[in-house]
Image (cartoon, rainbow, N blue to C red):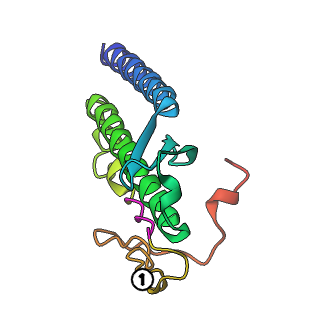
Amino acid sequence: MANEAAKAELAELLTSVQTGIAEIARMQREHAKLTASATVAGKRVTVVVNANGDVIQTVLGRNADELTHAQLAQAFTEAQQQAAAAVRARTKAMVAQVRQKNARLPGLSDFVPGLPDLRELIPDPPQPSLDPPAARARAVVVDDGAAGMEFTDVEQLDRDSGGSDVANSGW
C-alpha cells in the first residue's frame, strides 16, 4: 500500500510540475508581447521598447527641431530608460505571479531531508549601470559574488587515495 501511495503522490507531483511549466511557457509568450513607451522633453521625444528594453520605435513630436543635438541625445536616453524601467516592472510583476502560483510545488528538500531548496540558492543578477560608457561610475565594479557560494553546514569526508568510484565500470 505504501508503494501505491508513493506512486500516487509522485503522479500528483508530476502533474503539478507540468502545470507549472505550462504556466511559465504562457508567461513567456505574454512577456514577448510586452511593449512600453515613454515621452520626454515636453512631448517632443517618444521611445517605444519591446520586452527586452530594445528600442523598437522613436517618434519626434512637434518642435523637436528646437532641441539641440545634445538635448535630443539626452531625451532619447531618458525616454529609453523610462520605457525600459516600465517593461522591467511589468516583467517583475508577471514573474512574481508565476512564482506565487508555483510556490505550492514542493522543493527537493521536501523529498530529501537536509537538501537545500535550489530556488533559494539562485542569486539575484546584478543591476546593469545606466551611466554612459565613459562615466566614472561605470569604472567601479562591485562583485559581491566573486568568492562564490560558501557553505558552512558541511561535513568533511575522509577520502582514500584510490581512484574515484565514478569511473568504476560498475556504474
The residue lying toward the viewer, choosing from 95 and 51, is: 51
The answer to whether residue 7 is magenta is no
Q: Residue 121's x, y, as percent? A: 36, 57
What residue is shown at x 46% (from left), y 33% (from top)? Answer: 34
Indicate the position of residue 95 as horizontal and vertical percent values: 36, 38
Residue at coordinates 56% horizontally, 48% vertically from top-left?
Answer: 54
Residue 139, percent from left and from top: 48, 85
For the residue pair 4 and 85, the one nearer the viewer reads as 85
Q: Is residue 129 left or right of residue 120?
A: right
Q: Which residue is mark 1?
A: 137
Numbered range of the magenta stretch: 124-130
Q: Give the answer, above or below, for where 110 lies relative to 63.
A: above
Residue 83, placed above or below residue 14: below
Left or right of 54? Residue 86 is left
Q: Quadrant of residue 58?
A: top right
State how many labels appear. 1
In terms of secondary structure, what is the magenta stretch mainly?
loop
Q: Nearer the viewer, residue 135 or 96?
A: 135
